[in-house]
C-alpha cells in the first residue's frame, strides 16, 4: 500500500511516511492509492475482538513494513485504557442502535484514534534520531484526547494551544493537569481561531516545519481515519448475523473525518446502505449535499460546539474521489474555494455525491427536543452531538 497527496505532488509514500508527514508538503491530504477488498474475510473477522479486528484491518494499510509480531502488541496497548471490554460497543435503544464511542480516557470519540496514534508515533520514532514536535490548537476535546494519547511517549513533544477561558472547565483540567515532561499546554489570549492561525502559520513555513520536525494529530493525519474505519466494521458485526445484510449509519458531522471513515469502509466492501451526514446550523455540508453549493458562511454558536465548524478539513479527501481522483481537478476546485469562498457543482456531480451520502440539518431546538424525548422514551440520555445523529437518522 502506498499513499499520495490529493493535490498530486507527493506520491508513492509508505505508511510511515504518510503518518509522520501528516499534511502533505503541497498542502493536500494523504490518501491510500487503493482500497483493499475484504468481503471474503467477513466470516473470519466476525468472531474477532476490537483489538484483533483493528490489527487485521490496519495491516492492510501499513505497506508491509511493520511485522505482525511487532504491530499486534502496539494495537493491543492502544485500547487497554478503555472502560468497556468491547472498546466501541453497540447498544440497542428503541428502534436504533447507538455506537458508543465515549469509553476512552477522555470520553471523546477521538480517543479511539489518538490512543493508537501515540503508540504509532513512538514506534516510528524509535528508529529515528530526532523527536517529533506535535503542534496543535484546540477548543477542548481534541487537545485533551491528544494529550492523553501522547503523554509519556518517547520522542514526542506536544505543544497544545487553547484560548484562555474559552474551553470547558472539565476539558481544561483534562489538559492542564497532565504533568508529563513531554506535554506543554499554552493558554493564549484570544479565540480558537487565533490559536489555529498560529498553528497554520507554523505548518505553512516549510523550512521551519522540516527543521523542527513538526507533526500533526488532528484528523488530517491518515492514521486517525484508519483507526476510525475499524469501528464501522466492528459495529456492523455487532448488529448483523448475515454477511450480506446492509446497515445505515447516521453520523454527527463537523470536520467530515468520522463519516469519511464510513465511506472508506464501504469502499472496502462493507455493506453500508445510507451514510447520513448530520449537521447543526453550521450547515455547509448539508447545503452541499442538497444543492451542490459548498459556500463558506459565518460560524454560528450552537448547543453542539464540537461541530461548530465552517470548513470541514477532511472534505478535500472526498472531493478527490468526486473528481475521479484527478489531482488537477481537485487543485482547481481548492484554488477556486480559497479565492471565492464557495464552489458550485453541476447536476451530474451532485447526483454522484447524493448516491454516496444523504444529509440532515438539526437545529438547537430540535437538539433539545431530541434529548428530552429520547430520554423519556428510552431512559437513555444523549449528548447534544449524539442528538444530532439520532435526529438525522429519523429524518432519513
Image (cartoon, rainbow, N blue to C red):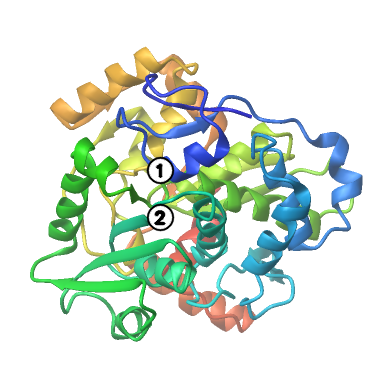
Q: Quadrant of residue 362?
A: bottom left
Q: Residue furthest front?
A: 129
Whether 44 is drawn above or below 51: the answer is above
Instruction: State the residue in front, 17 or 218.
Output: 17
The picture places residue 135, in percent across and down from the top left corner, at: 29, 57
- Checking the image for residue 280, the label placed there is none
Q: Is residue 194 left or right of residue 333?
A: left
The residue at which mark 2 appears reads as 217
Whether 22 is drawn above or below 8: the answer is below
Instruction: State the residue in front, 62 or 263.
Output: 62
Q: Residues within 10 Å of mark 2 (few under 14, many from 20)?
A: many
Q: Quadrant of residue 268?
A: top right
Residue at image location 55% in from the left, 73% down from the top? 102
Q: Quadrant of residue 328?
A: top left
The picture places residue 311, in percent across and down from the top left corner, at: 28, 43
The picture places residue 37, in percent across and down from the top left corner, at: 75, 30
Cα distance, mark 1 to mark 2? Answer: 8 Å
Mark sitting earlier along the chain (1/2): 1
Residue at image location 28% in from the left, 65% down from the top? 159
Instruction: State the residue in front, 125 or 112.
Output: 125
Q: Secondary structure at mark 1?
A: loop
Residue at image location 68% in from the left, 70% down from the top? 87
Whether 296 is drawn above or below 172: the answer is above
- Checking the image for residue 22, the label placed there is 1
Q: Secondary structure at mark 2?
A: loop
| Tally of numbered tags | 2
Q: Residue furthest left?
A: 189
- The image quadrant where one finds the N terminus is top right
Could you tell me if the residues under marks 1 and 2 are in contact, i.e. CB atoms within 8 Å?
A: yes
Whether 371 is drawn above or below 31: the answer is below
Instruction: State the residue in front, 100 or 362.
Output: 100
Amino acid at each position: 500500500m502506498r499513499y499520495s497527496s490529493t493535490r498530486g505532488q507527493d506520491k508513492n509514500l509508505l505508511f510511515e511516511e504518510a503518518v509522520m508527514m501528516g499534511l502533505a508538503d503541497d498542502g493536500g491530504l494523504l490518501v491510500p492509492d487503493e482500497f483493499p477488498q475484504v468481503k471474503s474475510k467477513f466470516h473470519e473477522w466476525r468472531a474477532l475482538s476490537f483489538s484483533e479486528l483493528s490489527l487485521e484491518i490496519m495491516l492492510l494499510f501499513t505497506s508491509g513494513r511493520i511485522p505482525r509480531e511487532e504491530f499486534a502488541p502496539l494495537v493491543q496497548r492502544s485500547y487497554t485504557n478503555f472502560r468497556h471490554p468491547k472498546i466501541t460497543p453497540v447498544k440497542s435503544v428503541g428502534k436504533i442502535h447507538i455506537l458508543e464511542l465515549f469509553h476512552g480516557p477522555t470520553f471523546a470519540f477521538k480517543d479511539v484514534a489518538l490512543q493508537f496514534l501515540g503508540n504509532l508515533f513512538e514506534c516510528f520514532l524509535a528508529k529515528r534520531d530526532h523527536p517529533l514536535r506535535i503542534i496543535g490548537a484546540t477548543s477542548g476535546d481534541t487537545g485533551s484526547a491528544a494529550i492523553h494519547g501522547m503523554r509519556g511517549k518517547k520522542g514526542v513533544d506536544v505543544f497544545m494551544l487553547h484560548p484562555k477561558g474559552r474551553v470547558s472547565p472539565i476539558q481544561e483540567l483534562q489538559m492542564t493537569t497532565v504533568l508529563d515532561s513531554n506535554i506543554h499546554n499554552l493558554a493564549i489570549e484570544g479565540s480558537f481561531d487565533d490559536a489555529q492561525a498560529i498553528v497554520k502559520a507554523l505548518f505553512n513555513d516549510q523550512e521551519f516545519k522540516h527543521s523542527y520536525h513538526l507533526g500533526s494529530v488532528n484528523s488530517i493525519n491518515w492514521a486517525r481515519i484508519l483507526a476510525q474505519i475499524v469501528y464501522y466494521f466492528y459495529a456492523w458485526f455487532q448488529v448483523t448475523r448475515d454477511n450480506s445484510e446492509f446497515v445505515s449509519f447516521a453520523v454527527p458531522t463537523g470536520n467530515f473525518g468520522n463519516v469519511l471513515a464510513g465511506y472508506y469502509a464501504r469502499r472496502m466492501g462493507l455493506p453500508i446502505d445510507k451514510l447520513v451526514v448530520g449537521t447543526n446550523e453550521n450547515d455547509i455540508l448539508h447545503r452541499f449535499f442538497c444543492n451542490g453549493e459548498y459556500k463558506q458562511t459565518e460560524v454560528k454558536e450552537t448547543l453542539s460546539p464540537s461541530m461548530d465548524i465552517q470548513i470541514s478539513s477532511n472534505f478535500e479527501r472526498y472531493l478527490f474521489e468526486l473528481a475521479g481522483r484527478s489531482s488537477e481537478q481537485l487543485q482547481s476546485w481548492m484554488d477556486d474555494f480559497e479565492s471565492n469562498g464557495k464552489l458550485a457543482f453541476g447536476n451530474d456531480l451532485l447526483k454522484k455525491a447524493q448516491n454516496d451520502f444523504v444529509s440532515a440539518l438539526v437545529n438547537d431546538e430540535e437538539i433539545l427536543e431530541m434529548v428530552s424525548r429520547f430520554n423519556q422514551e428510552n431512559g437513555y440520555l444523549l449528548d447534544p452531538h449524539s442528538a444530532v445523529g439520532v435526529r438525522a437518522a429519523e429524518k432519513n
